[in-house]
Image (spheres, rainbow, N blue to C red):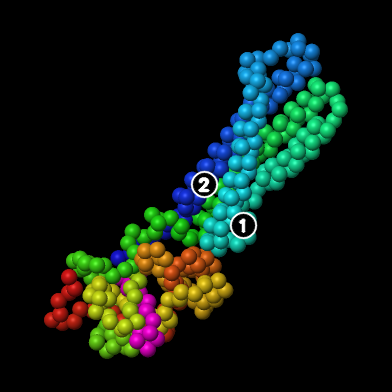
Amino acid sequence: MVQEQERVSRTPRGWELQTISVFSAVAAAAVLGMVLLVSDLALWAYLASDGAAGLSPMVRTVFTHAETFDLLYLLLVFGYIGGFTWWQFSTRQMLRRVGDTTGAATRHWAVGAWNGLLVIGFVIGYAASTSDAAPETKMGFISLRVGLRVLAVCLLLIGVWEIRGQVRKAVADSGVILRVEDMPQRASAIPARLLAAPTAPAPATDLPDADEEFWERVRRMATGLREDLALLESSGPYEHRWLLIPASGDVTAVRAALAPGATIAVFAEPPAASEAKGFTPRPAQAYHGFLEDAETGALWFQSVEPKRVPAFLARARSAARWGLYPAGDPTAITAANRARQGEPDPA
């Protein structure tokens, strides 16, 4: 059975790898920019002193291979700008899955400052290229432009790091599980091979038995709707799993998979394959969330508080089918799976 525990929602590993890649590209651009800045300042001092300042071997190497270094820096600039733009877009897409449609977590003042410094640097570079000033003056403007670019890239490094923390917090606060390993250890599904029956919990005394009459009602409901129905098996306050009653009404496999003593609830409304956006559930103190994995077909149970409904619906958008059922739904058919006298326990 699924033991529902308090789990911390984490950002997907793929997103974390994307973040590291973008951060590394920005850092590489910052390092190369610093090398070019030091070389430009040394060359400016050399021109301003009429050669008295001299040039170090490193500066001579950069100056000798200036076109190569400029091309490498240009590639890094286009690479990190493109990577950061793509990363911001994919981050906003991920946040929509947890109910954040504003993308507020992807904003930071350092990103705005980075944009502003790049614009200022471009204006200074253009002014230097069209000026008739002395070579040392032009070199001073070029050094200033490179310095502003380096400062801008360093600010972007801060922005990426801070946005990473903001996004992690937003995902954690949403309660939406995005990593497969953070899911409960076992999906709600009928096992291919039934194992030994678990220790039977104390059956509910105020519920009728799941007898033939009960299952006949379930069959008629499924065949009448011609759709699969969601059955919730509960073996304790934190142990729940979903099973599906097929549209054919054949309940043989489901009955064999149920734990003795478990409480059963079959909901009259089939799981939906439609868009979850705009859905408003009936008022309730709590809900049972049903999610069918679009790739594996596994069924996942999620206990949903009213304040977590938007986050659940955001997650439901990527599910093959979903359902949100009020706890204690009066339209559900409920029973206790008591073993009848003389009938062997399922094995």
Mark 2 and mark 1 in contact (Cβ < 8 Å)? no
Left or right position of 116 against 67: right
Q: In which quarter of the image is the N terminus?
A: bottom left
**Magenta-tinted stretch:** 222-239
Instruction: Name the amino acid type tagged 1.
Output: Gly
Residue situated in front as seen by the camera: 89 or 280: 89
Corner quadrant of residue 346? bottom left
Badge 1 marks a residue whose secondary structure is loop
Q: Is residue 179 among the parts visible in the rendering?
A: yes
Bin the neighbour count of mark 2 within 10 Å (Cα to Cα): few under 14, some 14-19, many 20 and up: some
Corner quadrant of residue 155? top right
Q: In this view, does 174 lie above or below 88?
A: below
- Residue identified by numbered label 2: 18
**First-in-chain label (1 vs 2):** 2
Residue 105, x across and y down, in percent? 60, 53
Residue 32, x across and y down, in percent? 61, 30
Q: Quadrant of the C terminus?
A: bottom left
- Residue identified by numbered label 1: 103
